Amino acid sequence: MQVILIKDVNNLGAYNELVTVKSGYARNYLIPQKLAVEASHSNMKLMEERNKVQQQKEQKMLEEIAKVKEALSTEALRVGAKTGTSGKIFGSITTLQLSRAIKDQKGYEINRKHIEILDEVKVLGTYNAKISFPNKQEIDLPFEVVGD
């Protein structure tokens, strides 16, 4: 029996996927638990429509990611920090500070959890960070630490 999954099911498939299972499994477990619906003609059309909408959303998201990548790669980001006389920073630069600098200088809001600083930042200079986007896309972000 063919069913369309309406939720992710371990060891079977993902949301909106057409799978073939035994009739008893579908009737006694998947359908009553609201994990799947029968693959009727109308349900198949709904699945195709959901797939089209999902593809459009992904395409729009990829275009937005491309804009953000282009904006971030144009010039190095500048992050201010309080320093001592020897050029050492009081504390260190965090992902929160980078996120705020991106918002202030580039106009894009990026969650600090998606930013990873590759080196420990303790003195003034140029460093690199990595930003992870959905769909496993990443960009290297050079940033410069300057004294306030």
Image (cartoon, rainbow, N blue to C red):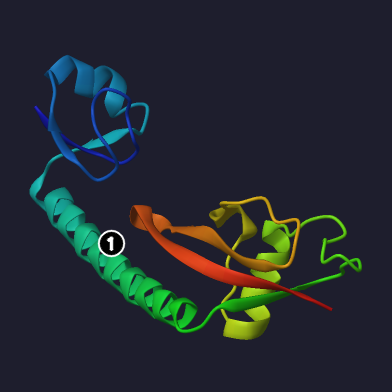
> Looking at the picture, does residue 48 appear above or below residue 28?
below
Pick whichever, 138 or 52, lies toward us.
138
In this view, 90 is above or below 76: above
Observer-nearest residue: 29 or 117?
A: 117
Q: Quadrant of residue 99?
A: bottom right
Q: In which quadrant of the rendered view does residue 12 lie?
A: top left
Quadrant for the C terminus in the image:
bottom right
Residue 74 in the image: state x and y as whole percent.
45, 84
**Residue 108 location, x and y as percent?**
56, 78
Q: Which residue is mark 1?
A: 54
Under tag 1, what secondary structure? helix
Residue 47: percent from the left, percent from the top? 19, 53
Q: Residues within 10 Å of mark 1 (few under 14, many from 20)?
A: few
User: Which residue is found at the position 61% from the left and 75% from the top?
Assistant: 102
Screen quadrant of the N terminus = top left
Three-letter code, disc 1: Gln
Which residue is at the front of the view, 3 or 69? 69
Residue at the farthest right position: 85
Image vertical order of residue 104 relative to residue 25, above or below: below
Position above or below: 18 against 12: below
Q: Is residue 45 left or right of residue 12?
A: left
| Residue at (41% x, 74% y) in the render | 69
Q: In this rendered view, identify the residue nearer to me: 119 or 22.
A: 119
Q: How many marks?
A: 1
The x and y percentages for residue 143 are 59, 70
Q: Residue at x 35, y 38 (%)?
A: 7
**Residue at figure coordinates x 36%, y 70% from the top left:** 61
Is residue 63 found left or right of 93 in the rendered image?
left
Q: Is residue 37 left or right of residue 77?
A: left
